[in-house]
Image (cartoon, rainbow, N blue to C red):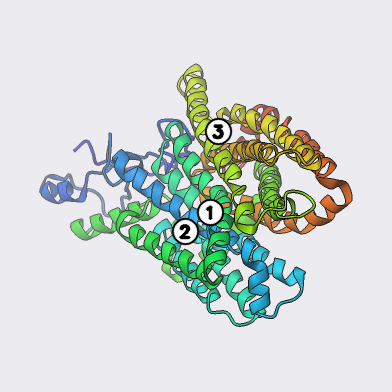
């Protein structure tokens, strides 16, 4: 019975070695399927009752292993989690062109409180992943994702019925908590399904969704507000969310390997009557579930405070994401301002198309370069891939981003034709999505088992920057103007972005080797 072996050895996985399949557990000796085992049970040799039997995926392929799924099934999972990651940012930004109408109807006269109705959603983005990301590593990706999305759906719908400013702010906050789940769990789903050399295009789509959402949201929000009540902003986005939720119920299946292997072990124990079958990955003990939850929720904080790679990536991604929302918030003051372009709300909203096109172009470009570069470097490295092979793809971001800000700022300052600032915004969007996409790929590759916790740690600073950057944008532009204000942002982008690929390439592997999270220590948490 070649498919059935016993082992008491501890195997430390390596991201791209044959002993590790990237799903959070090493490729220990495989066991046969439950059906095959039950048919041939009578032919099994006699084992000592105290022997331990480790449950692993069947070799060479296992239809239950998400990495061995058909491509259609992998893309179904990728598309659904990307749709979840799209609808939440759409809802977060759709209110931007309607803030004056909402404030008037709800008797909110303070501009700061009106701005809070928009940005409180992003504050919740910083908190939600710290809970839902680790919980998905305890109870599975799908149940946590779907319950969180249902939570978002309920409170986003409630925003449409708000009668006071505080009601709106509270509902927006809780909607943001639920809507934050796809931003951390989605990376884990992709790590579960895709091998590293295949992951670039999947990461591209998933990374594009939360960036494209804020570009699409204001356009839709402006036309909804201009043709009906602002309340339909929330009702329409809730209907779209409901449709995605229903699709997810049918097409999104569990991908987290420890959960799937535990089910396989339970089936074997039931079929054989032998309780020694187990999964060699730490799982939640029923009598100790609270401590396991506490350890898991603490993990992103530990990673953010002890992992130099996570800290560096979190800071750079925070800057990129903050710039995204700063540019989004600067558009109304530029294009609808009588002192500049004096467009109507609806026409001014169309300028967000430049950002959307930039995100689409940047995502497609980066996806192709990402996989091509990774596979080429892997072949040169005796067919062994490492996360640092993603670093060269960060170079376009370090070039495009400052070019975009210089272009956007000085053409706006000089009151040039509106298409010229839009071209600058296009380059900004290309550079932003390129950088975010590449760094998300690196985190997923380096922290495969704890991809959700790693993404949660990164999302804390990223979402706080998205919350805070738009708050200082008006003061910065009033003091420096669009020219020097955007030049300042470009200089910071150069200081952070130019050395980043080199530092990650040179020191990334050594830092990962010292990490109990990145080096594959299965005794962690």
The Cα–Cα distance between marks 3 and 2, rounded to whole angstroms, is 23 Å
Q: Relative to the observer, which residue lies in front, 248 or 262?
A: 248
Residue identifier under label 3? 387
Say few, some or many: other residues with alpha carbon within 10 Å of mark 1 (under 14 / 14 to 19 / 20 or more): many
Residue identifier under label 1? 184
* Residue at left offset 63%, top offset 50%: 458
Q: Which quadrant is the C terminus positioned in?
A: bottom right
* Residue at left offset 77%, top offset 49%: 340
Nearer to us of marks 2 and 1 is 1
Q: Which quadrant is the N terminus positioned in?
A: top left
Q: Earlier in the sequence, mark 2 or mark 1?
A: 2
Indicate the secondary structure of the residue bearing disc 1: helix
Residue identifier under label 2? 136
Residue 524 coordinates in the image, percent (x, y): 54, 51
Q: In the picture shown, does residue 294 fall above or below 375? A: below
- In the drawing, does residue 362 fall left or right of residue 33? right
Residue 239 coordinates in the image, percent (x, y): 42, 66
- In the drawing, does residue 470 fall left or right of residue 102? right
Q: Earlier in the sequence, mark 3 or mark 2?
A: 2
């Amino acid at each position: 019975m070649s498919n059935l072996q016993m082992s008491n050895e501890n195997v430390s996985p390596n991201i791209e070695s044959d002993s590790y399949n990237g799903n959070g557990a090493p490729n220990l000796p495989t066991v046969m399927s439950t059906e095959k085992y039950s048919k041939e049970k009578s032919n099994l040799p006699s084992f000592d009752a105290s022997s331990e039997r480790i449950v692993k995926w069947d070799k060479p392929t296992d239809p239950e292993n998400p990495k061995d799924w058909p491509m259609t099934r992998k893309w179904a999972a990728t598309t659904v989690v990307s749709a979840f990651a799209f609808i939440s940012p759409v809802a977060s930004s759709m209110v931007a062109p309607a803030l004056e109408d909402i404030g008037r109807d709800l008797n909110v006269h303070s501009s700061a409180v009106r701005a809070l109705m928009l940005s409180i959603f992003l504050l919740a983005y910083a908190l939600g992943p710290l809970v839902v990301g680790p919980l998905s590593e305890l109870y599975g990706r799908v149940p946590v994702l779907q319950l969180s999305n249902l939570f978002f759906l309920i409170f986003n719908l409630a925003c449409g019925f708000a009668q006071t400013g505080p009601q709106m702010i509270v509902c927006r906050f809780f909607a943001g908590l639920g809507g934050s789940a796809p931003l951390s769990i989605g990376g884990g789903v992709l790590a579960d399904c895709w091998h590293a050399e295949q992951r670039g295009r999947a990461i591209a789509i998933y990374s594009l969704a939360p960036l494209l959402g804020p570009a699409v949201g204001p356009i839709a929000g402006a036309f909804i507000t201009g043709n009906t009540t602002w309340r339909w902003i929330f009702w329409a986005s809730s209907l779209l969310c409901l449709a995605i939720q229903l699709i997810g119920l049918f097409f999104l299946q569990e991908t987290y390997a420890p959960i799937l292997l535990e089910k396989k072990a339970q089936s074997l124990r039931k079929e054989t009557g032998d309780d020694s079958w187990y999964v060699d990955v730490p799982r939640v003990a029923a009598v100790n579930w609270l401590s396991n939850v506490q350890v898991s929720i603490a993990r992103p904080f530990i990673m953010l405070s002890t992992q130099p790679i996570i800290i560096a990536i979190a800071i750079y991604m925070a800057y990129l994401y903050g710039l995204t929302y700063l540019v989004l918030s600067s558009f109304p003051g530029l294009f609808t301002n009588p002192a500049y372009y004096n467009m109507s709300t609806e026409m001014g909203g169309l300028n967000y198309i430049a950002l959307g096109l930039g995100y689409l172009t940047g995502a497609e470009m980066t996806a192709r370069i990402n996989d091509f570069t990774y596979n080429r470097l892997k072949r040169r490295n005796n067919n062994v891939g490492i996360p640092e092979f993603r670093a060269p793809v960060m170079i376009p971001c370090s070039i495009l981003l400052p070019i975009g800000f210089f272009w956007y700022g000085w053409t706006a300052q000089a009151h040039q034709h509106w298409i010229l600032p839009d071209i600058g915004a296009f380059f900004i969007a290309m550079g932003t999505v390129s950088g975010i996409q590449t760094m998300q790929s690196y985190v997923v590759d380096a922290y495969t088992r704890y991809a959700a916790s790693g993404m949660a740690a990164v999302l804390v600073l990223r979402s706080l920057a998205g919350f805070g950057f738009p708050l200082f944008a008006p003061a910065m532009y009033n003091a420096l103007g669009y020219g020097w204000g955007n030049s300042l942002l470009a200089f910071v982008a150069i200081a952070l972005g130019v050395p980043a690929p080199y530092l990650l390439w040179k020191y990334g592997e050594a830092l990962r080797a010292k990490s109990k999270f990145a080096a594959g220590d299965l005794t962690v948490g």
